[in-house]
């Protein structure tokens, strides 16, 4: 009897589960988005699960729902999940994409998935794994057999994790994007025939379909770039388009004379580079444009509704005619409606009030804010010389300096060292510097070189039997534009002094510094001119979000309780580092700061308000 009862319960659960899986439908038909047989306007916001601690995902999604949205869009960053060739992680901590999608569904949000394989997004290398550059004959974003094979492996792995969370299987995923803003790349790479570009983007679409994605596919491009970016039988959507008439005209042209019409990236804020002003978008402009979309049945996706943080070495970079690289800040606040720390900004409140006037569904109350704390003073009681790490590292020896990629290192730092058996002086040229270097002779700092400022040379005097050390930082790989194919890091061309190439007996010490324990073995000592490691412990009686005040410091990185908070740099405009309260604990907490340039004092504090718009010149 017990077995029969259990069997009956099992069948009931199975039927109930199946009923849940077939409850909702989503289609594109008759020029409209149709949800459960009724036309629906998509009111979406972009949030990247990789940029927000997993513990805060539900809070941020609740915030979106309370702003009046019915959908969330998210990129999937390939390199976040394949950290080494063939090493995949879709389950650990922030990488648990299926959990993020599940929570979004539980909070009543439809999900728009943007798997790339290219993402842009101010993310390291646009989401591509750095080691693709080590595959001979592979070129990214091209109809290249080796690249397409790598893309297929990624898409297949991703599909295994999320394909059963599509609305066709009872999940919340309603649409999937094929490639990403490919029209921009087509315009930037006119050296490649349009037919070849089209063959590549069509191949990505075919891979998505073959992997089991069966919800509507879409593309997103600037409205003037649809020729290169559109893919047959994928809905074309426009990015940054504020002219309704133009939007409808261009979508009609590439979609059989009909909608639906969607702005897949509507910008309520903008991206931020180090050493450049923090751009802001006025609230009234965002509200006015949102109302236009609402009144004209144009679906939209705020990019970003909540930006989050580029923890660790995840930030990417741009470039322009004045700068060979423009590294993105650690904060990805984006001047978004929901701040980096999850706060409801005035922009958020204004949009919420507008949505309440226009939507028929119920908008919930705004969630209670998460606690914020102040940490008056953290004493850093131990110091050590970072470059002493070379005493514990087996160097790679070569006639010429090797790139990060040749050293099989993706991120962080490499110390290039060479001993001279005869004196030499004159102009040191590092034209192949990628991206930032501190130059030392016998342990004394003689120069700071920086790709951002196009500063590749300095005067140098190397005595007999002296050691030249060049400490190089990778400040993030370019994520947008034609130069995405030129992303090697370190020293990528000969070191030259007085017009002579310096070759022979170069020693390279790999210092990725991705984990706090990498610097734990350095012997404590007083440090004068070299990069310094400072450690401390601080006790808390309560936990909450805080912002480490790094304004008086120079340039470096911070770890707290093993978490890599990311880079700081006193040029600004970001002067604080976001420290999520979920990464703190009552009692003892550990902090490690690696500072490259200057130590103002042996203390640091946590403040309640971020500073993201204070631009200064470099010291």
Image (cartoon, rainbow, N blue to C red):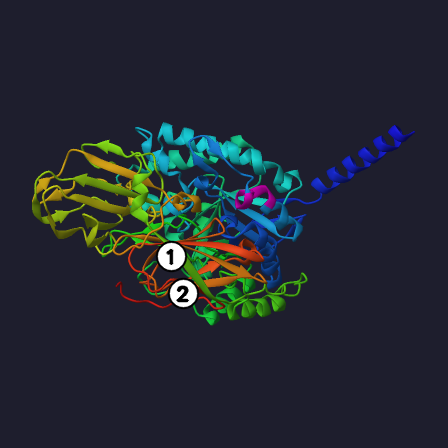
Q: At which x and y percent is residue 374?
A: 51, 67
- Name the chief secondary structure element in magenta: helix
- Whether 94 is among the magenta residues is yes
Residue 484 seen by the camera: no
Residue ID for mark 2: 612
- Whether 124 is among the magenta residues is no
* Foreground pick, 301 / 445: 445
Q: At which x and y percent is residue 220?
A: 45, 48
Q: At which x and y percent is residue 576?
A: 42, 63
Residue ID for mark 1: 329
Which residue does the image show at 59% across and 60% down from the upper left?
A: 63
Stretch in magenta: 93-99
Number of numbered discs overlaid on the protein picture: 2
Residue 85 is drawn in which quadrant?
A: top left
Mark 2–mark 1 CB contact (< 8 Å) = yes
* Foreground pick, 295 / 93: 93
Q: Quadrant of the N terminus?
A: top right
Which residue does the image show at 38% across and 37% down from the upper left?
A: 198
């Amino acid at each position: 009897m017990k077995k029969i009862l259990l069997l009956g319960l099992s069948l009931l659960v199975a039927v109930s589960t199946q009923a849940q899986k077939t409850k909702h439908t989503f289609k594109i038909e008759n020029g409209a988005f149709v949800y459960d047989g009724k036309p629906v306007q998509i009111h979406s916001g972009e949030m990247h699960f990789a940029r927000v601690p997993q513990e805060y995902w539900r809070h941020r999604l609740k915030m979106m729902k309370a702003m009046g949205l019915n959908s969330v869009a998210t990129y999937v960053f390939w390199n976040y999940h394949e950290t080494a060739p063939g090493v995949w992680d879709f389950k650990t901590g922030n990488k648990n994409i299926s959990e993020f999608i599940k929570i979004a569904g539980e909070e009543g949000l439809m999900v728009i998935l943007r798997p790339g394989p290219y993402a842009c997004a101010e993310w390291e290398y646009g989401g591509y794994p750095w080691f693709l550059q080590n595959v001979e004959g592979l070129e990214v974003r091209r109809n290249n057999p080796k690249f397409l094979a790598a893309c297929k492996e990624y898409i297949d792995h991703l599909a295994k994790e999320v394909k059963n969370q599509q609305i066709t299987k009872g999940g919340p995923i309603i649409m999937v994007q094929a490639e990403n803003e490919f029209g921009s790349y087509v315009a930037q790479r006119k050296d490649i025939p349009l037919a070849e570009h089209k063959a590549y983007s069509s191949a990505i679409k075919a891979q998505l379909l073959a992997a089991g994605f069966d919800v509507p596919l879409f593309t997103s491009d600037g409205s003037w770039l649809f020729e290169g970016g559109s893919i047959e039988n994928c809905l074309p959507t426009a990015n940054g388009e504020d002219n309704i008439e133009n939007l409808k005209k261009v979508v009609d042209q590439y979609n059989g004379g009909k909608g639906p019409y969607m702005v897949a990236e509507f910008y309520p804020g903008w991206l931020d580079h180090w050493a450049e002003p923090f751009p802001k978008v006025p609230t009234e402009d965002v509200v006015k444009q949102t109302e236009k979309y609402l009144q004209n049945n144009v679906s939209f996706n705020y990019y970003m509704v909540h930006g989050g943080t580029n923890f660790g070495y995840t930030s990417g970079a741009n470039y322009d005619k004045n700068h060979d690289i423009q590294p993105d800040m650690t904060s990805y606040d984006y001047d978004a409606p929901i701040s980096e720390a999850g706060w409801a900004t005035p922009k958020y409140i204004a949009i919420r009030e507008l949505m309440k006037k226009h939507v028929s569904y119920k908008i919930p109350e705004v969630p209670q804010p998460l606690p914020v704390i102040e940490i008056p003073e953290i004493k850093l009681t131990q110091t050590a010389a970072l470059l002493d790490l070379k005493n514990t590292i087996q160097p790679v020896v070569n006639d010429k300096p090797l790139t990060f990629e040749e050293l099989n290192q993706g991120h962080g730092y490499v110390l290039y060292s060479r001993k001279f058996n005869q004196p030499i002086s004159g102009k040191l040229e590092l034209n192949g510097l990628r991206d930032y270097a501190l130059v030392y002779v016998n342990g004394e700092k003689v120069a700071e070189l920086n790709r951002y400022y196009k500063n590749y040379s300095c005067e140098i005097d190397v005595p007999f039997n002296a050691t030249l050390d060049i400490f190089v930082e990778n400040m993030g790989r370019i994520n947008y534009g034609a130069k995405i194919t030129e992303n090697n890091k370190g020293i990528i061309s000969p070191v030259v002094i007085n017009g002579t190439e310096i070759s022979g007996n170069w020693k390279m010490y790999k210092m990725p510094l991705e984990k706090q324990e990498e610097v734990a073995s350095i012997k404590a000592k007083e440090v004068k001119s070299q990069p310094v490691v400072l450690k401390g412990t601080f006790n808390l009686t309560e936990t909450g979000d805080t912002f480490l005040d790094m304004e008086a410091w120079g340039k470096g990185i911070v770890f707290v309780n093993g978490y890599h908070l990311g880079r700081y740099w006193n040029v600004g405009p970001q002067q604080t580092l976001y420290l999520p309260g979920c990464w703190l604990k009552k009692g003892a907490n550990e902090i490690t700061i690696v500072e490259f340039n200057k130590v103002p004092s042996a203390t640091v504090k946590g403040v309640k308000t971020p500073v993201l718009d204070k631009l200064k010149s470099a010291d």
